[in-house]
Structures are given as structure tokens and as C-alpha cells.
Image (spheres, grey):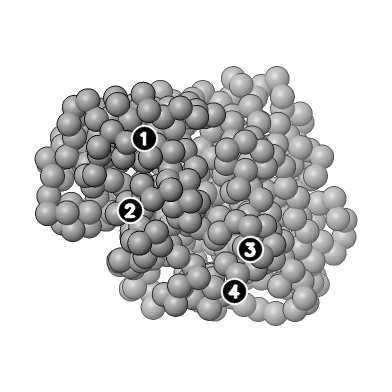
Amino acid sequence: MNRSTMKRLTIPALITGLMLPLAACGEGSGSGEGGDGTVVFGISAPLTGDAAGWGNAAKWLAEKAADEINETGGVETDDGNLEIEIAIQDNEYTAAGGARAAQTLLNSNNVDMISFSVGTAPVQALQSMTERAEVPMMTSAWGKDLKGPDFPYTFTVINTPFEVLQPLAEYVLDAEGGFDTIALLGINDATGIQSEQVSQDVWAGLDVEVISSDFYEHGTTEFAPIATKLLNGNPGAIDLTTVTPGPAGLLLRALADQGWDGPTLLSAGTGGQALVDAAAGAAEGVYMGLAADFSDSNATEKQQELQAGLEDATGEELNGVTIGAYDGVIALAEAIEEAGTIESNAVVEALTTMTFESSWGPSAFGAEEVYGSKQQILTPMIVTQVRDNAIVEVERLIPAELQAMQ
């Protein structure tokens, strides 16, 4: 093969009692549970709870990527070809669950690398172990402080607030003819809190006053009081930031029941059809930043194939978060081939210098000006909107850094 072409949470205290001694994973000795001739990629994702759809989709997508590579001979190294195995652990989308998943992946599954991880709090728990053990990690977590020179083994394989919120806000503000005030709502966890901070800065920079910013708890099912609170200040627009698709649909119904028909954003909006189904007609006009329609002709041929396969196998739709589970495997496999070894420092060096063929087409890791190092995947930013109960792509923005490489 040779595909290479070109409130904050304090995690360390939480996991101290859970952490076991780590193996010398950074040596890249192919020490995964599969033994010689294999490289084991780990996944930390929610398989239970209200974000379980992401974990189920991530498992299928990662295994799909691994199967494609294994069927063409595996991953080439200087010492022979390696077959990819996938090990996934349920992080429950919580810090405590993330710590348990991290312990199992690194100390029981003995993974060589992490090809995908979901949720800022659980990823922070995992990262405290992967960085110390020099294990490369691909993540979809949004926190800016997860990347940078202090965390050289961590790479993000989806767009984050710094790639999504500014262009999305600018587009909506222009499309809606402007508005002066906005109310924010997010999930009360590390992902929601860190994203809210970025949202505050983005809207302030656009001279839009944030008149309220609130959070809701995981597991909430009654959204009428939250809708009332959001509408109290008579906002010009509402940004639901990190609200997940099911709860977002219920909240949109509650807002519609109380007369809301203004501009609404779901900045981190994924799973567009799940939102539409839950909203029962109340999602019309909602803008999203991570809900590309991968069955649409605007998607690449590979993405359309993955969308069809994923939906048939799991009932889940491909979205802007879970697509990273496929691309994480591809990126690591191509970096290993570029390096000729699974030795972690050589793989990291390859990740920061190569271009590779992701599901989006030619991609690379960059954004050094934002994060201090090349750890952010460069892919298009897709603005979508609910129109006639369908998810419609209304704008595709290509990062200038990626354009310069092509």
C-alpha cells in the first residue's frame, strides 16, 4: 500500500486513584493485544447515554477504515506489514467514564495509538495518560487547551469552535440581515463550557450583545422552563451551541410553543436528521456548523459511501463529529507508512509534515498560528440549514492554509 501522497474541570485529581502503571507505549513496539503483526488503535467514546449514537457510529467507521486497509495488505512499515485492530471503550461522555476507559485502553487493551476520542472531559482524562506514555491520540474534543506544544501527541480530526463558530456566526448574521442581541445555551460539561467561552468572544467581536448564557444538565427532558428563560430577554437570535440533536429538537419544540420564530443556531449541531425528527417541524430554518449532509452530491464519493453503509448498519447518520473516527484511522495509518515504523515520535513527525487522503480528499494537519503547533486537521467548514425538514448545505468554506497546499 502507500497511500501517503502529500465552569473548567480539573481532571488529574479525578483519575489519580484510577490510574495504573503504564507500559512503555511510546516505543511503538506493536505491543497491542493482537501481538506481532498487528497495530492496535483505541477509541474512547460514549456507547451509553444521550451521546451513544456518536460512539456506535465511531465504532463502525473506525472498523470500516481498518477493514479497507487490512484488505489491501495492511499498514506498510520497514519491518513488514501490520494489520489494524480496533479496541473501543465506553467513556460514558463523562470525566469519570473517560478515566476508566483510558485505564482499560492503555493498560488492558495495550493500544499502540488512539485513533478517535469524544468529549472534552473524558478526553482530558485520557490525554493525561497518553501524553505521559507518548501515545499519539486523535480526538474530536473541542477544547483549545487540549492542543499546543505542551501536548505534542494530540491531534484533532474534526473542526472545532475556532474553525466553526466565527464563519458560521458571520454567515448567519449576514443571511438574516443582522441582529443586535443573542441568548446562548450549552451543555453543562467541559465541552459546553469551553465552547461557550469561544461563542462569547465571537459574538462580541461581531458587535452582537450576549444577553444571557446558560447551561443545562445531561439527561434533561423538560425544556419548557429553559425555553422560557431563553426568551425572557427578548433576544434577537438564539445559539444552542453544544446542545445535542435529541435535546435540541425538544427545546426547539418548546421554543416554538412559546412563539419563538427568530434566527436559531446550533453551532455544534450534528446529526441533522435526528434534530429534525425530534423537533417535529420546529427545526425549520435552524443553522448548523457540524451537520453536513453526507448523502448529498456535495459530499465526496467516499463520504457518500460511508453515509450509506453507516445508516444501513447502525441507523445512525454520518456527521461532522463521527467522520473523524474514519479519518483518524486513515491519518495514523498513512503516518505510520510515511515514518516506516509505529514508533510514536516518528509518527508524530509524519503527521505534522505530510498530506494524506482523508474522507474529504487531500488533507493535512495545520493551524499552527492558532494552537502553536500543527495539530488541527484542515478540512472544509460546512454551513447547513434545515429547509423543508431536510438538511441543506448553504456554504462550503475551505481553510486558506489547505488551499495553499493544493
Q: Secondary structure at mark 4?
A: helix
**Label 3 or label 1, whichever comes before in sequence order:** 1
Residue at 21% in and 41% down = 237
Q: Secondary structure at mark 1?
A: helix
Q: Are marks 1 and 4 in contact (CB under 8 Å)?
A: no
Task: Count residues near mark 1 (Cα–Cα under 10 Å), then give few for <14, some for 14-19, many for 20+.
Answer: many
Q: Amino acid at mark 2?
A: Glu
Residue toward you, 109 or 258: 258
Residue identifier under label 2:
284
The residue sitting at the right extreme is 35
**Cα–Cα span, label 4 and label 3:** 9 Å
Sort mark 3 into few (<14), some (14-19) or many (20+) by Cα contacts within 10 Å.
Answer: many
Instruction: Name the residue carrying label 4.
Output: 305
User: CA separation, marks 2 and 1?
Assistant: 14 Å
Q: Nearer the viewer, residue 26 or 143?
A: 143
Find out whether the residues at labels 2 and 1 contact each other: C-beta distance under 8 Å.
no
x, y percentage for residue 20?
A: 76, 29
- Label located before the other in sequence (4 or 2): 2
Residue type at mark 1?
Ala
